[in-house]
Image (cartoon, helix red, strand yellow):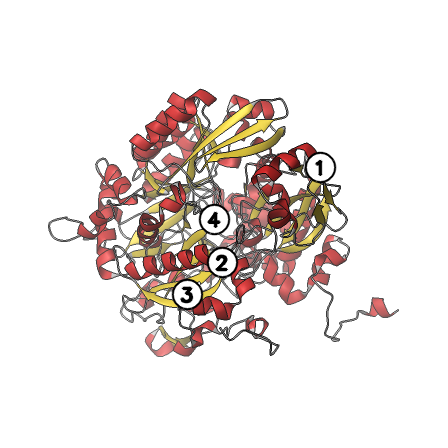
Amino acid sequence: MDAAEVQKKVYEMVEKMQGKKKLKPKDISNALEAEGATKEEVKAALRELIDGGKLVYSYFGGTAVEIPHTEGSANPQS
Amino acid sequence: MADKPKRITDIGAPHFSKFLPPVIAKNYGKWKYHEVIDKGTMKHVSETGDELYTVRIATPRLVSTDYVREMCAYADKFSGGHLRWTTRHNVEFFPAKDQVEPLKTALKKDGHLVGGIGYGISNVVHTQGWIHCHTPATDASGVVKAVMDELHEYFTTKTLPARVRIALACCLNMCGAVHCSDIAILGIHRKPPKVNEATIANQCEIPTTIASCPTGAIAPNPAAKSVKIKEERCMYCGNCYTMCPSLPLADAHGDGISIYVGGKVSNARGVPRMSKLAIPFLPNNPPRWPEVVQAVKHIVEVYAKDARKHERMGEWIERIGWERFFKLTGIPFTYQHIDDFTFARDTFRMTPTFKWE
Amino acid sequence: MSKDGKTPMLDDLEKGAWPSFVKEIKKAAVKSNTAKDLLNILERSYRDKVTHWKHGGIVGVLGYGGGVIGRYCDLPEEYPGVAHFHTVRINQPAGNYYTSNALRELMDIWDKYGSGLTNMHGSTGDLVLLGTQTDKLEAIFAETTAKGWDLGGSGSCLRTPSCCVGNSRCEFSNIDSMEICDTLTHKFQDELHRPAFPYKFKIKVSGCANDCTAAIARADMSIIGTWRDDIRIDQAEVKNCSKDMDIKTEVCDMCPTHCMSWDGSTLKINNKDCTRCMHCINRMPKALRPGKEKGATIMLGGKAPIVTGALMSWVIVPFMKLEKPFDNIEDLIRKLWEWWDEHGKNRERIGELVDRMGMRSMLESTGLPPVPQMVKAPRSNPYVFWSPEDVK
């Protein structure tokens, strides 16, 4: 699969689930592998999106990938 | 992001060779034997004949940058600018032979405790507690300070039959993995989380919150865009609170401390073993936790009196039997002492042979 | 904090012989409002008997999924200095050796951007910088990496590996634990910073069975040094030792396999029966030394209680030579991760996965042969799962 296409699919998948279910990198990989992408392609796409700041890792007892947002526990910075 | 300077990433820790004292770099892998000179001093001798002296002091683990600078100043003056930390939060210096006594004198004059080597109580490994943790059932630094104010002589001068490793974790998730310590001080919650109905809909993702519970104790409450807690299933791990700040479980009355004993990780003489429950609950009484301090001190003293030389606490208890441990310490045996979780059956006595006390 | 900003309960913990963390917070509070409000909110916790922190799961530095732990206080109006109180984990050098210059550089950076409070070290081993705000994280990262430091692990990733002093100062060490720790840390940078595992994975390296890093209790992968040949004896030194100790009672009688005898002039060891527990060597380091054929026992599965109960690691490779560049252990770890990645559920540690799937699945996928050293005893229950292949 084309790198830009994988990135687009990854982002859309995260966007769709944002606030509903926290997606682990493995969940994303499994879903896109089923659509024909390889593990390596998904990994590269995640890295590109995360290094570019479009997605971020989060950790709530387990790691997930999300669109940057203000989390429930956050306080405004003084 | 193209206009930003190139970020440095993935370089890992600096290689340790940058930090080794010259005598260590020279004799790396060539050490022949060591001698414990006193409770705060060791000498290692190399096959080359070189000698390395180590002087150890206790730290409070939570320290200021100025404290670290103070340690650096001792290192510069006495230890060639080199120092290290032990896995139990002690600082070690490596003075030349003629600097050992001047260093110790300087450290003691400034109020530092020199010790922690050999048969006694070394520094307490512990977690963050009320300093930084979101699910603690007690404080960590304060309890450790109170306990060690009472037991510090076992660090500096007094000896015990063997090492006694004390560790504290401020909740049962044990980011400090204290479960194989001679004495484990463990914070516990005893009440399930309370749902903050006013904030939960905005603060939390309901499905992930439900999924966070290891025992399936959280059920949806769709009408209120909230959740319900099946209280009888909760074992108070606080995972849901990590996920969802609207499920706090800290409770001034419910929270406190339990004491587990007899664990070790060393394989010497006998295999490693987990610590086992001695006291199910003691209240949080800051700032000095007198009940906890007394309990720990009492267990140490009974052990010191009854154990044979080289016997770790767990080895001593296995020799005399748990029934006698409870008799000697006077600690009451309760329902809570009998396991009813995952590995319970392994702990039942499947023989009619036991002691009466 | 009481209205007048006094902290009577914490002040009490400045007294006493043991070093006081309250004094340390107060030292930092002279320079930092974050440290000042930490003191105040901690006094509040001492009064309320509950914590005042919330977990933040999303703060970090660009590109990494670990190394920063987000914290916010639940009373930001009263304690604005700790509205944010994030922690930065700096990957410690193997063996925790430092030079004063290197530490001062780190401390200067921390005074510039943080509370001025630190843990030397955290439970996993990192040098922990305690208490900063979201907008400082990138600057801290830039300045520490410029000085040669990197962040440690947090999240569902490889956590910062740690080790004992090993060859640097210990004659008991059977492996170069510091070099192994450093090498694995660098081989696995991607796995450390970009979490892709079902849950956390910890590696600890101890040079001998005394296990000074508590690897067996605290690491999913416990690498523990051992040897295969005979304990080296210096009989003259044994005699010297006998002047200060009762060798029969304190050494021979406490040997778990009763493989030693002492007749007053010669110490005999039946090395075939020795299980290398370290007791005799600990007691007489001048007289006894581990053998020369050194390597490590590789153990798997250790962890703290969450989620289904604490585990201690068990043997998966009884003996492995570990020499630079340590490709054999890297290879094994990668195979284990592949198996875990394929089968592990969310938040399932690798030891728990072995529990659920059985040792066979793990052994087959890693190519490790079943050997008696892996078990305390073979099974007693007759519910054996036979595969069609076995029955052919």
Q: Marks 1 and 4, how far apart in space?
A: 42 Å
Q: Amino acid at mark 2?
A: His
Label 2 or label 4, whichever lies nearer to me, is 2
Residue at position x 46%, y 64% in the image: A21
Which residue is disc 3 drawn over? B329
Q: Give the CA separation, mark 4 to mark 3.
A: 41 Å
Q: Are marks 1 and 2 on the same chain?
A: no
Tag 4 near tag 3, CB within 8 Å: no
Q: Nearer the viewer, mark 4 or mark 3?
A: 3
- Could you tell me which residue is drawn at 36 percent across and 30 percent down? B71
Q: Is residue B165 placed above or below B45 in the rendered structure? A: below
User: At which x and y percent is residue B15?
Assistant: 54, 30
Nearest to the observer: residue B24 or residue C357? B24
Q: Are marks 4 and 3 on the same chain?
A: no
Question: Residue at label 2?
Answer: B179
Q: CA distance from mark 3 to mark 1?
A: 42 Å
The numbered mark at residue C232 is 1
Disc 4: which residue: C154
Q: How much space separates mark 3 and mark 2, taking CA atoms?
A: 21 Å
Residue at mark 1 shares a chain with residue at mark 4: yes
